[in-house]
Amino acid sequence: MTTDVSGTRVASLRLASARAERRPCAPVRDLLPEGDIAAAYAVQSVWVRERVAAGATAVGRKIGLTNPAVQRQLGVDRPDFGVLLDDMACSAYAPIDIGRLLQPKIEAEIAFVLAHDLAGDGAIGPAEVAAATGHVVAALEIVDSRIADWDIRIVDTVADNASSGLFVLGDKPVPLDGLDLPSCAMSLWRDHEVVSQGHGSDCLGDPLTAVAWLATTSRDLGYPLRAGEVVLSGALGPMVPVSPGDRFRASVTGVGEVSAAFSGGTS
């Protein structure tokens, strides 16, 4: 399928305006050939290149749409990925200004920190991912959309860097040895109320499988996963809307806990 260069440019400008004006925009799928995932990733790449040129550093990737519950929420049926930049990382010990975001939602995940590249020519499966992983930690991804009312299809979310926003990593690294990731149970609390639950098996059956998909896809696109990168492997439960003053805590059995609080409401 041939990428529509003019459509890619216009879609990039529409999303850039939404970010700059802090006002969600119309979907971009009307600007790109229907179902053209390559064109959507081209739009994503424009934003990443511009941010890196402005001084940001790519520190990892995020996998989206791995959880059937999240797929149902958004009306899509396949995973996607985006790029994590250094200024997207947030501390669990300081409130996050919600004014940095447009339409935030939060989800709990398992984050992989790679000790080795995943760049070989051979098959990349769960075993190869496990061998390349230095450790895992519990993570919170604060997803966001520049598309008004989250009216997205797969092309929209891919173009919008997989609807990425910010992320928080737990501070207690855990080795993979002995962990049965599919059976790990996740609970996400807002204050004292459980607002989302799931298991590792809700992430493409196994978070290792999700990372193997990403590693293969990224390598085949010419951007393999490298040692030191952080990979957010995908939601373990439904995402939850975020409001000013919210405080969240997530627990993943065997992996650990992570928390995030939100302040503000204006930018």
Image (cartoon, rainbow, N blue to C red):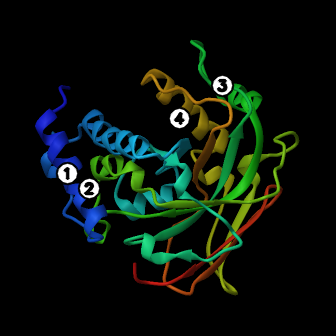
Going by the numbered disc 4, the residue's amino acid type is Leu
Q: Secondary structure at mark 4?
A: helix
Q: Secondary structure at mark 3?
A: loop
Q: CA distance from mark 1 to mark 3?
A: 34 Å
Query: Neighbour class for label 2 at 10 Å: few (<14), some, many (≥20)?
Result: some
Whether residue 257 is visible to the viewer of this picture, yes or no, is yes
CB under 8 Å between callouts 1 and 4?
no
Q: Secondary structure at mark 1?
A: helix
Q: Identify the residue position indicated by label 1 in the image.
A: 13
Q: Identify the residue position indicated by label 2 in the image.
A: 16
CB under 8 Å between callouts 1 and 2?
yes
Query: Neighbour class for label 1 at 10 Å: few (<14), some, many (≥20)?
Result: some
Disc with the residue nearer the chain's start (3 vs 2): 2
Whether residue 147 is visible to the viewer of this picture, yes or no, is no
* Residue 154 placement, left or right of 251: left
Task: Say which residue appears at 64% left-offset and 44% top-offset.
Answer: 207
Give the numbered dot on residue 214. Answer: 4
CB under 8 Å between callouts 3 and 2?
no
CB under 8 Å between callouts 4 and 2?
no
Q: Identify the residue position indicated by label 3 in the image.
A: 117
Q: CA distance from mark 3 to mark 4?
A: 13 Å
Residue 205's place in the image compared with 143, above or below, is above
Q: CA distance from mark 1 to mark 4?
A: 27 Å
Rendered location of residue 119, percent (x, y):
59, 20
Going by the numbered disc 3, the residue's amino acid type is Asp
Residue 260's place in the image compared with 62, above or below, is below
Q: Quadrant of residue 6?
A: top left
Q: Quadrant of the C terminus?
A: bottom left
Q: Quadrant of the N terminus?
A: top left
Disc with the residue nearer the chain's start (1 vs 4): 1
Q: Nearer the viewer, residue 180 or 262?
A: 262
> Which-is-in-front pick, marks 4 and 2?
2
